[in-house]
Structures are given as C-alpha cells and as structure tokens.
Amino acid sequence: MKSVGDKVQQFINANLNTDLHSLLLKKSPFPDVSMQEIVQQIKGKHVAQKKFPFLLKDGIIFPPQLNLEQSSSDKTAVYKSKILEGKKFIDLTSGFGIDAYYLSENFDDITLVEQNPELLQTVEHNWTVLGKKAKFINQKLESFLSENTEDFDVVYLDPARRDHQKNKVFLLEDLSPNILEIQEKLLSVSQQVVIKLSPLIDLKYLVSVLKNISRIDIIALKNDVKEIVVFLSKENSESIQCHCINLESGESDFQFQFGDEENASAEYAGPEKFIYIPNNTLLKAGIFNLISEKFNLKKLHPNSHIYTSNIRIDSFPGRIFEMEVIDGKQIKKKGQFNIISKNYPLKPEEIKKKYGLKDGGNDYLIFTQSKKGKLILKSV
Ligand SMILES: C[S@@+](CC[C@H](N)C(=O)[O-])C[C@H]1O[C@@H](n2cnc3c(N)ncnc32)[C@H](O)[C@@H]1O
C-alpha cells in the first residue's frame, strides 16, 4: 500500500473493532485496495496502540505483521534517545524505524539504511506524514559500508534473528547482520556503535567476542528484561560500565563495572527480618555476590539469589518483604497468596495444588532454600 485515501482511512477507522476473519471474507469496497491490505492496516493500528501510539495518526501506513513484530516499542526507544547525542546519526537496520525515530532526536543529520525496499518506502512515507527528515538508503548495509566515505557520531543496529529455533545458544553469528564480521568496519566510521540485542544473550560471551565495549545497558520494562544494549567506542575504554535500568517501576537503577562480580564475595545466613529479591536486570547481569557486598545483605543460598537483613534498605533495586519463617502445616487451605518459588523443587502451580491455595491478594509466600535446607517464608 503506497498511501491511504480519505475514504479508505474512514473505512479502516470504522472497522477497528470488527472481527478480522469475517472482514477478510468480504469484498473490498475499493477497486484499488484489497481487503488484505485493509486488514494489515487494522492489525497495524492494534499493534501501534500497545507498542508505538505516536503512529496512531491518519495517513500512517503499517507494514506486514513480521515487520511490526520486529520493531521496538517506543518506551525503550525513548530511554535510549536520552543517552545519545551528536551531529550525525545512522541506523543501519532501520526496519519500521521506531528506534530511529526516537534515537535520532538529538541529531541534525539522520540516515536510515534498510534492505527491504517496501518497508523503507513505508517508513519514508510515514516520516513525511510526521514531518521528520532523513536520508533513506535501500541497500544491504554491508555494501553501503563498503562504499561509504562519511563519518558518524553514532551508528545504531538492531539486528534481526536469522531463525527462531528455541533452546539454542544465542550467538551473534545467528543475527543479520553478523556483527562479528563488521565490527571493525563499524568502528572505523563512527565514534560510537550502539547495538540492540536480545535479553537472551550472555554478557560474558559478548565481552569475549566484541571489541572496544565501553558500556552495556540491561533494560527492563516493569521488571521484564526487554533489551541488552551494547556500546562500542572508537577509543578503547579501560572498563565496561554496566547499567541495570527498570523503566516504569519507579525503582532505583544500579550501576557496576563489568568484572566487579569476580572480585566480590557474598556472606551467607538464614532468613532475617527483611527478605530482598533483586530486579531481573540485576539477575540477568549475574552479579549475585556483588549485590550482597554493595547492599550489605546476606545471601540465603548460593543458588537462591534471595537476600536478607535485619535492616530495611529502601534504595535496593528490587522487592523488599518483611517475612517470617513458617512450617508447611501452618498454611491454611484456600488461603490467597502471591507465590514465589526460587531454588525450590516445586513450581508455583504445583505449590498451589499441594496446599490448595488461591492466587493473588496482598500476602506473599516464598518457597526457597537456605544453606540449612528447604524454607517457607510468609509476609507479615
Ligand atoms: C529487528 S529489525 C529493526 C527494527 C527497528 N529497530 C525498529 O525499531 O523498527 C531488523 C531490520 O534489519 C534489516 N536487515 C537485516 N540485515 C540487514 C542487512 N544486512 N542490511 C540491511 N538491512 C538489514 C531487516 O530487513 C529488518 O528490517
């Protein structure tokens, strides 16, 4: 679809809540726009409501489902836009251009490279509707880089997964483009290279295969880790600064230097008055001993990643509970609890069944282990 006329737009807006299967069976009322194209636009608006509401404007065109799924959400893009600035920005894997739209906010000169011609045309059309200017280059980034003579302040990449095989070790070679093959070229054309990666990627692996890493951000939205963003710098930096960020939670962020964990050690103890569960960004970072050392907390067990203290530390980046140890026999049948199971043989569903519990409410039960054995904690 190249543009949306007024009548087609009205039809799309009037059918936002219509069942799409039955709509697809009907004949399009427009001779030059098929029902498939109309349904693609309705689906696009549905995705935009959740992921990028700034595109809920008449005249905006949405690409096929796969391109919508691959595009970033505006929330993480807004965060990244605040930490990047300079004159010249280039996104070498533009996709639907959500990241590029936000990340280029503090730049004067913007270039988007994308191999898919229809997708790039759609982005160019939308950016015209939005009044945002850029150069749009429809090329494979490898050939773009081999011809390019310009220097940039920031090069951004959000590589696509080549395959969707689950349970497979996540490697940079599985991405398009393969960052390992182009990393030197990228550093030769830009002061800073910023790469968005899946939360499944292992940080130690990243540090072992990428050159000149200066910073790694682990970004979560309401405690759900969404992205790992790695920053490469032209000048080799001596240390790697890591940032754990939890957007829309109001909780503190946490920063450390990669390698701090190797020099940290944890103290162990049984449960005290307060129980601490770190945010998922810190767990993803694997800084289990560092958490104990930095916040002066004791760990319950090497594999539990639950911490304890008699003091309440409000700045802790995670959840804090006041709890007491209970015996399984003290759990009342049909009680309502939020159940947390960590390093415990039963999953929350199995625990619910075993004790006949209901989900929810304001009370918590934690099933875990200390060094002395299995343990049940109840909020007080
Ligand atoms: C995950 S999507 C990017 C989404 C984008 N960040 C957004 O916010 O909408 C990756 C994009 O990179 C493009 N791509 C992958 N390999 C490429 C290559 N070698 N050259 C140019 N584009 C490439 C794909 O066509 C795809 O559109």
Image: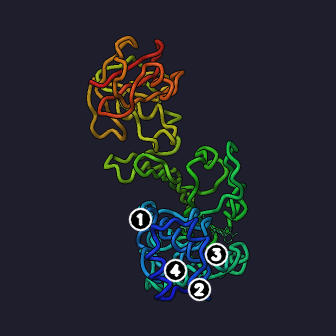
Which of the numbered marks, if any, corresponds to residue 2? 2
Q: CA distance from mark 3 to mark 4?
A: 13 Å
Q: What amino acid type should be assigned to the residue bearing mark 2?
A: Lys
Q: Residue at x 53, y 74 (%)?
A: 41
Q: Is residue 217 left or right of residue 222?
A: right
Q: Amino acid at mark 4?
A: Ile
Name the front one of labels 2 and 4: 2
- Mark 3 lies on a secondary structure that is strand
| Disc 1 packing (10 Å; few <14; some 14–19; many ≥20) | some
Q: In this rendering, does residue 153 appear at all? A: no
**Closer to the camera, 346 or 145?**
346
The reply to whether callout 1 and callout 3 are in contact (CB within 8 Å) is no
Q: CA distance from mark 4 to mark 1?
A: 17 Å
Residue picked out by circle 1: 78
Q: Amino acid at mark 1?
A: Val
Q: Is residue 38 above or below residue 201?
A: below
Residue at disc 4, secondary structure: strand
Q: Find disc 4 in the rendering and name its residue.
A: 110
For marks 4 and 1 on the same chain, the one whose residue lies earlier in the sequence = 1
Q: Nearer the viewer, mark 3 or mark 2?
A: 2
